[in-house]
Image (cartoon, coloured by chain):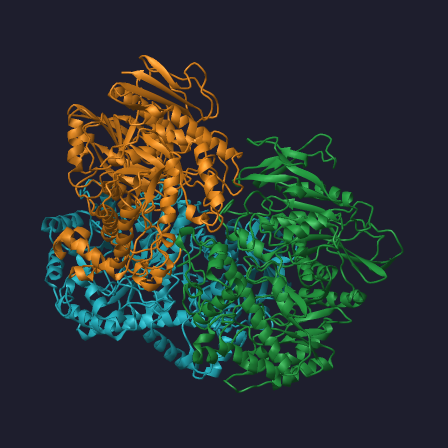
Chain colours: A cyan, B orange, C green
Amino acid sequence: MDFRTDKLLHGGDYNPEQWLKRPDILEKDIDMLEESGCNVVSLGIFSWSTLEPEEGVFHFEWLQEIIDKLYKRGISTILATPSGARPKWMADKYPEVLRVDETRRRALFGFRHNHCYTSPVYREKVHIINKKLAQEVATHPGVILWHISNEYGGECHCPLCQKAFRNWLKEKYQTIENLNDKWCTTFWSHTYNSFDQIESPSKIGETQLHALNLDWKRFVTHQTADFIHHEIAALREGGSTLPTTANLMYYFGGLDYFKIAKEIDVVSWDTYPTWHKEAVIDTAYDNGMCHDLMRSLKGKPFFQMESCPASTNWQSVSKLKKPGMLFAQSMQAIAHGGEGALYFQIRQSRGASEKFHGAVIDHYGGNDTRVFKEVSRVGETLKEIRELAGTTVNSSVAMLYDWDSQWAMEDSQGPRNKGLHYLEAMLKFYRGFRKQGVNVDVIDMTCELDKYKVLALPMVYMFKEGFAKKVRAFVENGGTLITSYWSGIADDTDRCYLEGTPHGLMDVLGIRSTEIDGLYDWEENSFVPVAGNELGLDKTYTCKYLCDLVELRGARTLMTYGSDFYEGYSCLTVNEYGRGKAWYVAADADKEFYGDFLEKVLKDSGVSCGIKEEIPDALEITVRENENEKYYIYQNFGTEAVNIPVPEGQISWIYGNGSDKLKVYGLVVAKVIV
Amino acid sequence: MDFRTDKLLHGGDYNPEQWLKRPDILEKDIDMLEESGCNVVSLGIFSWSTLEPEEGVFHFEWLQEIIDKLYKRGISTILATPSGARPKWMADKYPEVLRVDETRRRALFGFRHNHCYTSPVYREKVHIINKKLAQEVATHPGVILWHISNEYGGECHCPLCQKAFRNWLKEKYQTIENLNDKWCTTFWSHTYNSFDQIESPSKIGETQLHALNLDWKRFVTHQTADFIHHEIAALREGGSTLPTTANLMYYFGGLDYFKIAKEIDVVSWDTYPTWHKEAVIDTAYDNGMCHDLMRSLKGKPFFQMESCPASTNWQSVSKLKKPGMLFAQSMQAIAHGGEGALYFQIRQSRGASEKFHGAVIDHYGGNDTRVFKEVSRVGETLKEIRELAGTTVNSSVAMLYDWDSQWAMEDSQGPRNKGLHYLEAMLKFYRGFRKQGVNVDVIDMTCELDKYKVLALPMVYMFKEGFAKKVRAFVENGGTLITSYWSGIADDTDRCYLEGTPHGLMDVLGIRSTEIDGLYDWEENSFVPVAGNELGLDKTYTCKYLCDLVELRGARTLMTYGSDFYEGYSCLTVNEYGRGKAWYVAADADKEFYGDFLEKVLKDSGVSCGIKEEIPDALEITVRENENEKYYIYQNFGTEAVNIPVPEGQISWIYGNGSDKLKVYGLVVAKVIV
Amino acid sequence: MDFRTDKLLHGGDYNPEQWLKRPDILEKDIDMLEESGCNVVSLGIFSWSTLEPEEGVFHFEWLQEIIDKLYKRGISTILATPSGARPKWMADKYPEVLRVDETRRRALFGFRHNHCYTSPVYREKVHIINKKLAQEVATHPGVILWHISNEYGGECHCPLCQKAFRNWLKEKYQTIENLNDKWCTTFWSHTYNSFDQIESPSKIGETQLHALNLDWKRFVTHQTADFIHHEIAALREGGSTLPTTANLMYYFGGLDYFKIAKEIDVVSWDTYPTWHKEAVIDTAYDNGMCHDLMRSLKGKPFFQMESCPASTNWQSVSKLKKPGMLFAQSMQAIAHGGEGALYFQIRQSRGASEKFHGAVIDHYGGNDTRVFKEVSRVGETLKEIRELAGTTVNSSVAMLYDWDSQWAMEDSQGPRNKGLHYLEAMLKFYRGFRKQGVNVDVIDMTCELDKYKVLALPMVYMFKEGFAKKVRAFVENGGTLITSYWSGIADDTDRCYLEGTPHGLMDVLGIRSTEIDGLYDWEENSFVPVAGNELGLDKTYTCKYLCDLVELRGARTLMTYGSDFYEGYSCLTVNEYGRGKAWYVAADADKEFYGDFLEKVLKDSGVSCGIKEEIPDALEITVRENENEKYYIYQNFGTEAVNIPVPEGQISWIYGNGSDKLKVYGLVVAKVIV
């Protein structure tokens, strides 16, 4: 099922159940939503104890009333299922709904997201209320989308989950001999005689069988996906045919979002960048890459479900967004293919842990605040650029981000337990591509590679069965591959490949990785150009953390290490394979290297965003398109105004224009007829 | 009941039960106590297993004998109740006396302060032994005061405490609807259906309902106070009419000392400053402010119950006190209104965890040690200045320090989770006042304001019901108010005030706080003077951590921010209200700012210590007085000798004199006829 | 029983049970073992689940076959008992075999070393399999030594262990009154009425009775030794007369290795230095001192059981050993008296937590790796210098390292809880001696002192009963004693000595320690030479952390403190006593001080390695000898080639020669006829 909207969404989480005794405030809220150009709110998140204050006693009337009032003022509703937090009466009557932690201790009631996804009781209670909401509330024309629960995450080690885990393993491995073999249980005498003997990982039990840890994480994703499936089934049983979303969270380590995304119709996510902590452009690349990941999860438009309109209260420092920052953040979501920019939350709560989380309407409550004015500016702008709704982002470049691989790599001991700097490495690749204005997809190993021209595999530790073959075909058919150190080391159950790595690609890359050196934080090495190298690289760059030593098996060397006993060893190589080329970056080089190197690789591969002028630093360019038109979206995340480089073609200016300098945090949108 | 003494107390904790097999040592102890000028010891702390080695079998004779021997040599006894640690037999027979932690796990026997304050068994056992001590030991004329238990603290989450907590809540809130409303339980569906559902906060359960956390802390204070009440009732039942004390600890976060102080007759406290870690004057201000707090708890004289005569063994580094430091520390207790300076402990224990804690008599045991000589010097001096006994400290300046407000502020998420620097802010205000030699009281919201001329409210996050009104009246009647950022935010149950803050004082201050910016540790902003401002401030100061942005509503601006997007916004304002003035400091400025600003505000308010000359840095001046005389007490906590500035009037020199320079760590006491 | 070998051992841990499905690999392993000059492997460590996959079902045939194949190729076997990790079926059927932690929570199955040493079931199961291995496997002529379990360590707090602990205490103290007295239980009312009341230390119970903590640690050593005894008894019952070893670990804090060593025939240990983290010579001294400790445990040859041939995966950074480093590390084991240098492990495992731990044969599996070549070089060299086998290391200098003393000192609170820098102090003494090329033994208080000329007691906090007397006799008879600050403070049960310290040696040293000052990390003081001092010391040195203030009682002062209130106080003293001399170092001076001071003390004591020329920095010289010959072993742990200083006598060059400069990480062995 597709979620389609003909406007760009603007709004956010709204919790009127906290204000039911203040009808004056509820009235004012609607006025202010309208004033700020909001066209949608999320309702019902965490409302279970208001919706069902006692077991079997339901109160939906307040919700129905608010949906109706909003609808009459042009504001739609994204309706949540309330499973993100359950009422106290349920925990008291049915303790099984509470999670058990890895030490096998059952939690007390409290916090949120504290419920077993396996518990039949919890599933039943969720089923009942979801179905009722579908029957009695979602039928209102104001409701346009389901918001399934809230920020899924966490795990439970209760006996019910143990049993489900064993069944899942049995289905996967069929025989215990097979599992023992794949898990390498001979190590430390951990061989199992039967599936019944298996227990989930625990710091007071087993943590050293990495394959167990990895399968447990996969099971947690499986069980959560199954729970989502169960939630949605209740809605369908209740007759609702509305599309569904779930709000995801950044590069959340607890769930494989590529699998979770399959259960829902449209991806949405919650973004809380720490703007102004580092250079704004650094934060913008980090946030932008995550937008691209979210878009790539389903290869479809997504939207920003939550973001903070003011300062975030749970971060170490609650820093104010400087003027224009909120606008720029909201527009970035649209630039990267989002269909809306929503906030958490509309009205600040008076008490409890989020009372100082920024909101559209704060405790003071006036429309004369700096934040309210900036929100209104976003609302206005989203109307001005609404023709972007429905256009898509197409990319020639893909980077690989695979949860299984990351889990396995980070769970392993070695080669650098105090930090592999994986995400930083991803971001250095990403900014290298993005500085040239080209769109980037962030995909996993199951995705199709054919539509890309350039494929980057930074630290792809795990090569799942068939993946090397797929990559080989990609290069053979003319693709450009860039692989880095610490790739192709282990198989699907984290068993190391024998006979050389990167497994299955040694001939494609023309090298074999022989050893990898860990550097202390205070150490560094360097990348020194080989005179006359084919990319014309002529600077020396530093590298840190990890240095791979490769044996040449046909590749050509472009750069070599500058010091240590491996001074002179190759650290950047290239190899022709089939109609394509395969590059190998042997160490964690600095961002200047990636900037220069990837600029040249893109040129070499014929990939461009269509702009020939040089693109100023900190100017982010993203392209959305439809059949006939391309929209060039320019955002300035730097510290001074810059000129706008333009593509060839007939340009019309949708927002701002190309003749003025683009101010800091400003936006320009140009349309080009293709 | 009042505790009165016609001398200044000198002595300390003494544990003869550790040496009963060494009568030679016990004899020598008394000789050395006498030699060092000690006139009092605390006995019986942690002696339960010696007093009642088996259930119902009591041995008081050794204690009676020692009290008698001491008495005959002129040394009084402060007699402890033994509840600070209970014997092993009790824990074994009655496990309910042991505490249960927040994860609901009962402690094993061990350590100290490990007992449930609710347990009927523990209360009964305490009652029996306290009553017997009153009947059989406290009747000796050598006993002058009760020392109730030792350093009360900690909490218990056992079922008995849960029940008591629920009853306490029921009494407070009457209906569960009222509690739900005040606690904002709608947040995350935490609504309660009945008081029976409530459980104490726990990291494995609920920690996000700040009102629950806050009320739990209040309950812990309540239950502890109730236990103290119970302890004292047993003494009275045993016929004792002696006054009582309990030894408090610095700015201890576990108990609201304003409430605890109501249960006892005289406040005493244990001070362990880390002298020589930072500049000695910094430590002296910190210690001095705590003396002032302890004095303000009951608005009556107090005394120093414990301090370390040598180096403290439980701190990260056991640093020796340099020559004169012990003397200076002891005299500071007297200067700030204390009636005595006592030590922990008289004789160093041979084994267990405190065996390296400094003592008057160390393991070596001689009277030729550096420490013993310095202790003797203190003893001698206390005799020389004994006329200070019974004089009081009166203050025109009050600073507010409220446990509830601090608890709520620190439990909240935002605006700066990595550190609000509250105590540092308090100390910057304090040193600003104290550099002018004026006495300062440290009060809470229940205290009378009428007797003060200047009231400082640094970071008073919570304005309890009626407080704003009281402050308003104070200003109206001519008082000078100084309020800072992050004040007047929340009500008694930590619900945020709506419609603008500082709640209830916006008109008094002539401003509204609109937003607050958190700064990273490496960031700073500045206070820039407005030309010609009415205080004549002409320097620029730095500020850090938190910057409040205010909207002017009638106030005048004296200083503005120097950078960031709020450059030029007001950061120091003043407003006239009634016959008084109200100042607002919007950010955490440096100590130089507070030094200059408060000097001028004191002058503007007509508050002075009576000295017109400039007071040298690091010279602490405190004034004690009786009906006819003022005693100016001078202490040099700096690094070089300084001149003594004198007040007007007829001066006589009680200790030292004003014509010599005052040496480092030295003391001068001048008497002035009023 | 003695373990004798006529060759130097070379080999390592080998886990063929991980590769039973790959006979091709097992064949290749043997070829490569032979190629690399390996002559021994350890088999059977962690093999229990392969040896006894179900209760009572044994499979030894695979092991027998491998032993036989290896034997036929000249490779011996060290056969392990499998108790280091037990099978899952055992934990499931007999939960008592699993450990209980200090919070009294039983562990789940997992990890390794997770079994109760007291459990009768575990002991029975170990007995059965050990006996069977003795009967059925160890009878093969290829088996030369028993490897008892693996890296013993850890503790269990289960009811069975509690009971055993009480019995052990009862036997030690006889009466509870005696225990109460020795443990100082009066402190905080912790007096026991009977042995039945005693519980092991726990962070949720008792941790403040240091004597309890100390006796618990002693009990853990006792119980582990008893378990080892039990393991070996089963082997003897099975008819095996082979000698035994257990692999120890560095300065492991969990067990008193002097006591453990008594249970086995030959000491072996596992060394994992972090080469290249600090200057290589620093690491070499640290590693060298541990070799000397291991040799001193039994006063007999030992060997290196484990070391990493490549990079270690469980350290924070997996750093490659630079070329030559592995060779140098292996040779250092031989230089210090070792009879072999073995590795962990032969073939890298494919999965689980050690999959990236370096190995002789890595995942790639070729013999063309840098590591394999370096291992082969070690193998070759060990053959060339095999005449060192059977020679011994004799020392004139002893340093004291006593587990009880260290445990007590580090458990105590004060005088510097944030770090006493004990091991660093040991190493500063050690490098001072070793820079002069003299051999050093590292002994405990039970060892004979008569054979030494110089005895160093750095920070010997505890003087056990009789020790001071023994030291006194040593000095009386002409020995040179060097004692430092924080020595002779407490007795066997950590009760402080009264009447002055260093207890029992004040007259020998001619001083009394009066106070000790803790310095913050950022503070320092200095050692200033007294003009014309008898050692001719003429430089000023810094000191840190701890400064002892001594009162002279006859000693002469050579150096005094340079600052603080104790400027001018003695910090280096000497006293004649009997025919010997006693030096006292009052503070933690820098390594330059120890270098200069100990050089002069050695000269003053007539101790030398026989070389008169100056020894270059970072050149380590160790002497092995037999009746007629001395072998001078030179190793360069510096950063540049150095000249070889030679002793007098007739020299023949066993490896390398004295005319060339010795390269970095290089080796030279010279034989001198005595």
Does residue A195 appear anywhere in the picture?
yes
Image quadrant in which the N terminus of chain C is located? bottom right
- Please tell me which residue lies in front, B221 or B520: B221
Residue C503 appears left or right of C241: left
Across and down, in percent, residue B387 comes to 33, 23
Q: Where's residue C420, x and y in %?
A: 55, 47
Q: Left or right of B454: which side holds C395?
A: right
Q: Number of callouts in the render?
A: 0
User: From this viewpoint, which residue is outermost toward the right?
Assistant: C650
Q: Position of residue A370 (x, y in %)?
A: 25, 40
B26 vs A105: above or below: above
Residue B254, percent from left and from top: 31, 47
The answer to whether residue C127 is left or right of residue B413 is right
Drawn side of residue B387 relative to residue B171, left or right: right
Of residues B429 and A654, the one nearer the viewer is B429
Image quadrant where residue A518 sits? bottom right
Answer whether residue B252 is visible to the viewer in this image. Answer: no
Task: Please state, as top left, top right, bottom left or bottom right, where the C terminus of chain C lies in the image.
Answer: bottom right
Above-or-below relation of B284 to C264: above
The residue lying toward the viewer, choosing from C407 and A72, is C407
Q: Is residue A388 above or below residue C74?
A: above
Q: Nearer the viewer, residue C655 or B81?
A: B81
